[in-house]
Amino acid sequence: MVAVLSSVLGFPRVGAQRELKKLIEGFWAGKVSEADLSQQAQALRVQHWKLQRDRGIDQIPSGDFSFYDLVLDTAYQFGAIPARYQSIPTGFDQYFAMGRGLQGSIRNVEGEEVQIDVPAMEMKKWFDTNYHYIVPELSTNQEFSLNSQPSIVAHFSEAKSLGIHTKPVLLGPVSFLLLSKGADHEAAGDFELLKLLPQLVPHYRTLLAKLAQAGATWIQVDEPYLGLDLTPTVEQAYQEAYASLTQDLPGALRLLLTTYFEQVDDRMALIAQLPVHGLHVDLIRHPEQLSGVLAKLPANWVLSLGLVNGRNVWKTDLDAALQLATQAVDQVGIDRVWMATSCSLLHCPFSLEFETKLDPEIKDWLAFSSEKLTEVSILRDAINQRYEGTETDTTNPADKAKVDAVLSANRASCQARRTSERVVNPAVKERLAKVDPSMLKRNAPFAERYPVQTEKQHLPLFPTTTIGSFPQTKEVRSARRKYKSGAWSEEQYNAFLRQETEKCVRLQESIGLDVLVHGEFERNDMVEYFGEKLRGYAFTQNGWVASYGTRCVKPPIVYGDVDRPQPMTVEWSVYAQTLTEKPIKGMLTGPVTCLQWSFVRDDQPRSVTAHQLALALRDEVSDLEKANITTIQIDEPAIREGLPLRRAKWEAYLDWAVSAFLLTSSSVQKGTQIHTHMCYSDFNDIFPAIQRMDADVITIENSRSDLKLLRAFEQHGYYNASGPGLYDIHSPRVPTAEEMGERLQALLQYLPYQLVWLNPDCGLKTRNWTEVESALRNLTETARVFRQKYANGNTN
Ligand SMILES: *[C@@H]1O[C@H](CO)[C@@H](O)[C@H](O)[C@H]1NC(C)=O
Ligand SMILES: *[C@@H]1O[C@H](CO)[C@@H](O)[C@H](O)[C@H]1NC(C)=O
Ligand SMILES: *[C@@H]1O[C@H](CO)[C@@H](O)[C@H](O)[C@H]1NC(C)=O
Ligand SMILES: *[C@@H]1O[C@H](CO)[C@@H](O)[C@H](O)[C@H]1NC(C)=O
């Protein structure tokens, strides 16, 4: 090969119109047959491969497709199926049970009809993204095997039969083990898990041999952990794993070690020793690492440059990207450099072509996955043309005039965005400059605040509440569509929302919950809703990205300075409060989560955007309080996921994240109770920061992880009130009161009973009313039992 190639690390599997989601959910509902599921999923893969080929991608990924999650697929492929799923026959039932739990009757492996009730495996955030992966559970004597499903080899052959030679993507063995956890609820450290390498790697070798047999050449081996903090044990594991992996490597195979989200220039001593054939680096997160990487890149290795952001929506500054590319080509030569996306495009929406309502000025600044394919191939062509005389054996190269036209249009868009008046709002900048430390502190300590709040809201022992949202049913979504399409007037839509809100309030009263919510029927999404009400935000019609399983989210886009033209939530909270004597909890999304779950502008530090959001939300908190809504939840589920991947960078992030929360929450009177909610957080990591947030009540999404989170509470001494989720809302299983009681009892080992709240672990929008009602009735039953048990402080 004598030309630079274009490469993509992964493509959004869900499809242009979320076809895959609809298909799989149809299968779960019994409306799509297994055969149709397989066939239509294949059709979608074919479409995506062809699209990439037509847009000029040379190294097209295969094996980036999944019915639920790629880490789950890796576990499934290597036979790491926890014992509790082993009575379910191999196939979709078993696979989906691992991802989402299963409650119902199935035919077991013996062919008998049996009742089964198994919870799902734990989910965790994929590094610092908002995508959740399934955490493999491995036992100390774990045995692996190579299953034929899900078949990465078959996918490669599928593409090959269309004349598309793909680059299979594997999650590397070291990262796979480091993403896993011990099966027996014991925290297995790195050491324990990495001990499994000798059992695991031979199956990777078999898989590689099969891929070679099928005709594969380049294999993308994802090892994102290479960029994280490495212990000597992990370094050694890398050396041993890759030595073993490449034993008897079929001659035609080439391994591209793939890193993203962090820098690896300071890891080159280790990386250069590994017997692979190329390296991919993320030059979006760390463009400055290029020199260090080039200095130590082994001769003959390919260097894949992550120049097109796989996680954000802005057009690539092609001139800047070409500068980096030129630096690389000058040093290692035209035949050893690839132009690539920084990471998989999984985290980026499908295509701008469906955005008919975006302001044209803003739309011109954006590129989604399909447009990014073109950027990657234009970068390739531009470089190849600069080093003229190179033969181009690449896919669909554009001629020089076209490349020049694209480059100059790109230059104009980037320039326009930098100077647009829509981006800069001097009033916001001025207000932010005036924030002083007194605005970041509550006016009384918790010990003084909490009794006042308890009395004001007449709260019993073990108060019960929910996290905010109630079922977003077909009716709710259809009403929103009718309103957005103009078929319903605003009055019609609001009348509908009032009716739903009332139904929700009445149900909560009848169940006997203590602190009620309005249900959030007016909200499409906890971030997009606020985005739509704030200035500086744009939102899309079809900008979906995968969140977990089949679930997608549609992050809004922060393009300019943010402020709040008028109250955003007060009307609905106040309406709900008119319906009941019980306190209504006002529901806000916190500044860090708004930031984390949006596509954020890349032309100023994230901390500045977070504080602009905080000021807007601070005004909302004040307006709620003025309207007598004196329980206010400020959700920060995303605070942990924003944590930098290397420890050395944590403190700086936590400082501004906590300060943004405090700026939002601290204006209130002591009788006003501030709740916050967090998700899948490994609290040990950030405990001191959570304490500094000084919320009155923290509710935690914890039920799929285990009690180790709560040990952190004990260890660090959490003095304020908390509601660790008593059941997992991501699963359709309805827990019994007894089950939740056992969980609560276990929690009370770590938390003072006077300060414990009872609640589900997350919002209920993805569940149906039947499930919600049964689960919450059981929850209040648990509260009743425990109130009796603990009356008069009697804890026996
Ligand atoms: C809030 O409650 C106070 C005391 O109950 C009452 O005097 C005031 O009118 C209420 N304000 C609003 C806006 O409802
Ligand atoms: C809770 O309350 C105590 C006492 O008022 C206070 O010092 C502390 O910062 C608060 N937060 C946590 C997490 O303990
Ligand atoms: C709600 O979900 C449960 C369990 O997932 C299911 O059995 C039930 O039919 C659903 N009810 C409605 C009204 O959709
Ligand atoms: C709770 O939910 C289960 C369904 O899982 C139901 O069978 C049970 O009767 C409910 N009630 C109690 C008190 O657990």
Image: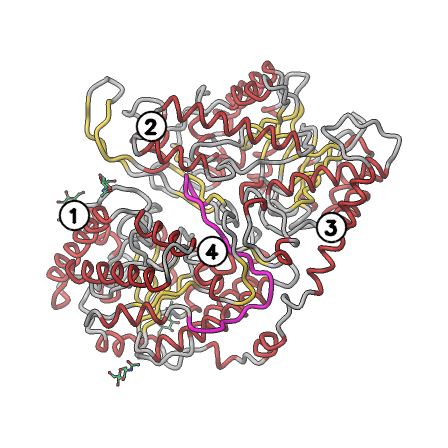
In the rendered structure, which segment of residues is drawn in magenta? 547-567
Q: Are marks 1 and 4 in contact (CB under 8 Å)?
A: no
The amino acid pointed to by label 2 is: Gln
Q: From the viewer's side, name the closer residue of 353 and 101.
A: 353
The image shows a total of numbered marks equal to 4
Please check the rendered image and state whether residue 560 is part of the magenta-colored stretch, yes or no: yes
The amino acid pointed to by label 4 is: Arg
Q: Earlier in the sequence, mark 4 or mark 3?
A: 3
Image x and y of residue 493, in percent: 34, 60
285 relative position to 334: left or right? left
**CA separation, marks 1 and 3?**
61 Å
SS at mark 4?
loop
**CA separation, marks 2 and 4?**
31 Å
Residue on which disc 1 sits: 738
The residue under the point 34% across, 38% down is 100
Q: Quadrant of ligand 1?
A: bottom left
Residue on which disc 2 sits: 94
Residue on which disc 4 sits: 640
Question: For disc 1, does the CB lie below 8 Å from ligand 4?
Answer: yes
**CA separation, marks 3 and 2?**
48 Å
SS at mark 2?
helix
Q: Which mark is residue 410?
A: 3
SS at mark 1?
helix
Q: Which mark is residue 715?
A: none
**CA separation, marks 1 and 4?**
31 Å
Residue 89, image quadrant? top left
Residue 365, above or below 194 = below
Residue 330, image quadrant? top right
Please check the rendered image and state whether residue 423 is part of the magenta-colored stretch, yes or no: no
The amino acid pointed to by label 3 is: Asn
